[in-house]
Amino acid sequence: MSNPEKIHQKSLQLLQEQLEDTQIELSVMIKKIADFQIAVPSWALGAGGTRFGRFSIGGEPRNLEEKLDDIGLLARITKRTNAVSLHIPWDIPKDAAAIKQQAKALGISFDAMNSNTFQDYGQPLSYKMGSLSNPDAAIRKQAVDHNLEVIEIGKSLGSKGLTVWLADGSNFPGQANFRNALQWTGDSLKEIYGGMPTDWKLLLEYKPYEPNFYHTVIPDWGTSALLCSQLGDRAKVLVDLGHHLPNTNIEQIVATLMHQNLLAGFHFNDSKYGDDDLSTGSIKPYQLFLIFGELISGARDKVQAWESISWMIDASHNVKDPIEDLIQALEAISICYAKALLVDRNRLMNCQIQGDVAGAQELLQAAFQTDVRALVREARIQSGGEADPLAYYRGEKIRQQLIAKRGVGAKATGL
């Protein structure tokens, strides 16, 4: 047995000893961690950027087929992802049947589809003043028709959902009528919802600002929930962890949405100020741990089924190797989930009922401070993945292989 393997086994043994006084079984936790899969977005495979610049790293996927290959690699070495989320028109398949077959061979399914109403790609009409909320009915129709097209593409690939994020809003007082913009958005969404298959769900995202800095049509979870309630029970709120004002209590939002069976899913990332594309868990891991705590609690209390929630990473970086970033993000999500599984929910509930604030804090802190990396690693090994995916990726010089194959100047499509 090699030294890393000995360290791994010792860590597992220590963790087992820590859990002896609890009702938690190590094997059960390992299975839950192994079963938890997070979709990867097609746009995260290339170097991102800002309005100031973009720095390609070379070897980026030049088409949808190459994006699937990269996600297949992630699926194989991490065993934490088994689905891809496509963005249209960035990822329109030339041959849907062939793409579906390639994905199947790689062990990948198609998560929710993403429409694009913040770029019009040279269409005769413009989204400059909005898409689904545009004062011009013809432009609203263009945006609705685009979403209906995305649904058709998704149907051909086996997807079961549509994610809608609107950049619509205004930058100056008087630029837009708040009430009209909201009404037109609701009317447009009703058309889109009506065009979905009955086994699909609509995931409606929200964001407080950017690219509009005076008002955004869907700025918060409450507005998203309001619109969803007008559409039907297959429309739910998508929580992007970076789409909140600083210091927002996201775990409370999650609990509230679950309480109403209105939580569609997550876009995992992190933020420091107003940005929303940092690596998941790199800034606020305790917040992510608390969010998972509410999810586990809500599912246990049967307020909303765990299986009804969608999970996806939504990040894009211009200073990191995108595949390395996704490896780190998948690991961080799994670690926070594993730590949340350690919390004794019955004891926590008793502390809450008895007003034992210090006791509740101790329970949470003890779970969060527990080193569960060996547990996450064991779940991956038992699933057939690499013990250390990042070390494997670097040791095999995979980025260099991709550059040799695709070219040093290769840039991902759609970015």
Image (cartoon, helix red, strand yellow):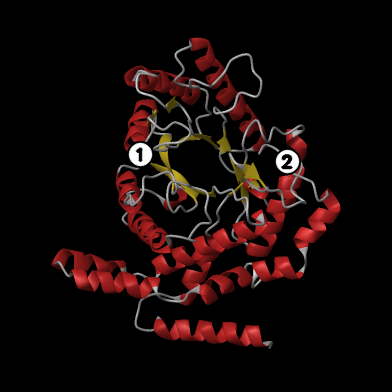
Name the residue rendered at 39%, 84% in the picture.
20
- On the rendered image, what quadrant is the C terminus found in? top right
Which of the two residues, 68 or 135, is positioned nearer the viewer here? 135
Residue 338 x %, y %:
46, 67
Circle number at residue 21: none
Name the residue rendered at 46%, 83% in the picture.
16
Q: Is residue 138 left or right of residue 363?
A: right
Q: Residues within 10 Å of mark 2 (few under 14, many from 20)?
A: many
The amino acid type, in three-letter code, at marker 1 is: Trp
Residue 103 x %, y %:
71, 46
Residue 286 x %, y %:
39, 63
- How many marks do you count on the picture? 2
Q: Outermost residue toward the left?
A: 354
Disc 2 is placed on an element classified as helix
Circle number at residue 221: 1
**Which residue is disc 2 drawn over?**
64
The amino acid type, in three-letter code, at marker 2 is: Leu
Q: Is residue 58 left or right of residue 295?
A: right
Residue 291 x %, y %:
38, 56
Q: Is residue 254 above or below residue 328?
A: above
Asked whether residue 182 is in view, the answer is yes
Q: Residues within 10 Å of mark 1 (few under 14, many from 20)?
A: many
